[in-house]
């Protein structure tokens, strides 16, 4: 395995994961999948890690699947792309969704194919103004994957989801922000500084409550209003027994800044 395909930086309270195959616009090969899976597993089991930042090196964020690994010109057999989705892309986006802490994506350049949809699976998407999102799949005869049909439909509605998926039209970061597909488009030179600032905030945040809020918002996509009220009650009960809730209230009453530990176990 090539160890260099993913750069992992341990910061105080958070992790920065940088996709690092710049000459291929950080497209995914098996090495990159394996490295990212291992890094996210490690994050999930690290009590001191309270947030994750995913970004890319070079001029692109991620161009999806490395098509160099999909050269079937010498073979008559049909490839089983469902198997690679099962093995890699679906577990990856499920892993991102299931992490009980914020996952921020800093889209530093073009995000195409699964690269676009992995970004959309993150909790907060920041993007350089020069970045573009492309549902490139139809250009090679595929359908959007990595949760793209779900994310686009929920974030944008059917008309825009279909427009992007069926035409593969590039969507610039500022338009993506205006449409509500991402949180914020940022001047290129300021992207990483803003992302780091956000991460430093998350590293001092009440992590349990952030994780529970993330979970509740995911469930809102399928729950009825009444089911959601019940879920909020249950999650509030859980949040209310966290150390950070005690600290938050004490700090408010004592008119001081709270010092949240983010500990998941009281
Ligand atoms: O297969 C399965 O397991 C199923 C799962 C599929 C998931 C998917 O993601 S399918 C979609 C795969 N991705 C694409 O179809 C996107 C292909 N790339 C592009 O359309 C363009 O590169 C971009 C629009 C992303 C960027 O265009 P541009 O003009 O800025 O850059 P470029 O010149 O096309 O690319 C720069 C280099 O990166 C170039 O290499 P070279 O010629 O300088 O040696 C190019 O070949 C390489 N590159 C870009 N994307 C990929 C790639 N190499 C391998 N795979 C890529 N996906």
Image (cartoon, grey):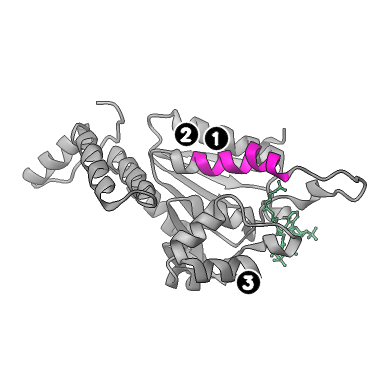
x, y (%) of residue 164? 58, 68
Quadrant of the image occupied by residue 137: bottom right
> In this picture, which residue range is highlighted in magenta?
81-95
Q: Is mark 2 within 8 Å of ligand 1?
A: no
Q: In the rendering, at what x and y percent does residue 9 appear? A: 52, 40
The answer to whether the residue labelled 1 contacts the one labelled 2, judged by CB atoms less than 8 Å apart, is yes
- Does the residue at mark 3 contact the one at mark 2 (Cβ under 8 Å)? no
Name which of mark 3 and mark 1 comes first in the sequence.
1
User: Callout 1: helix, strand or loop?
Assistant: helix
Q: Which residue is mark 2?
A: 43
Q: Residues within 10 Å of mark 3 (few under 14, many from 20)?
A: some
Q: Quadrant of ligand 1?
A: bottom right
Q: Is residue 31 magenta?
A: no
Q: Which x, y percent locates residue 198?
A: 38, 53
Res 17 quadrant in image: top right
Residue located at (80% from left, 48% from top): 70
Q: Would residue 258 appear left or right of 70 to someone viewing this image? A: left
Q: Please report the residue visible at 50 percent of the width from the left and 51 percent of the height from the top.
A: 121
Which residue has dot 1 on it? 39
Q: Which mark is residue 169?
A: 3
* Marks 3 and 2, how far apart at CA: 35 Å
Q: Is residue 91 magenta?
A: yes
């Amino acid at each position: 395995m090539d160890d260099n395909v993913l750069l992992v930086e341990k910061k105080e309270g958070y992790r920065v994961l940088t996709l690092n195959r710049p000459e291929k616009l950080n497209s995914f090969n098996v090495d990159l999948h394996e490295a990212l899976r291992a890094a996210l597993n490690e994050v999930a089991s690290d009590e001191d890690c309270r947030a994750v930042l995913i970004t890319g090196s070079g001029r692109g964020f991620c161009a999806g699947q490395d098509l160099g690994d999909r050269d079937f010109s010498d073979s008559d057999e049909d490839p089983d792309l469902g198997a690679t989705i099962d093995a890699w892309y679906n577990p990856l986006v499920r892993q991102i969704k299931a992490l009980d802490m914020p996952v921020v994506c800093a889209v530093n350049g073009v995000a195409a194919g699964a690269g676009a949809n992995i970004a959309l699976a993150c909790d907060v998407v920041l993007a350089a103004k020069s970045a573009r999102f492309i549902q490139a799949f139809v250009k090679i005869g595929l359908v959007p994957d990595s949760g793209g049909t779900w994310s686009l439909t929920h974030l944008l509605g059917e008309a825009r989801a279909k427009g992007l998926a069926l035409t593969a039209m590039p969507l610039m970061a500022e338009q993506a922000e205006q449409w509500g597909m991402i949180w914020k488009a940022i001047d290129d030179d300021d992207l990483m500084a803003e992302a780091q600032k956000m991460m430093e905030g998350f590293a001092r945040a009440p992590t349990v409550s952030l994780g529970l809020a993330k979970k509740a918002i995911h469930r809102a996509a399928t729950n009825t209003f009444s089911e959601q009220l019940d879920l909020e009650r249950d999650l509030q009960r859980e949040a209310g027994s966290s150390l950070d809730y005690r600290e938050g209230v004490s700090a408010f009453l004592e008119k001081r800044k709270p010092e949240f530990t983010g500990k998941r176990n009281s």
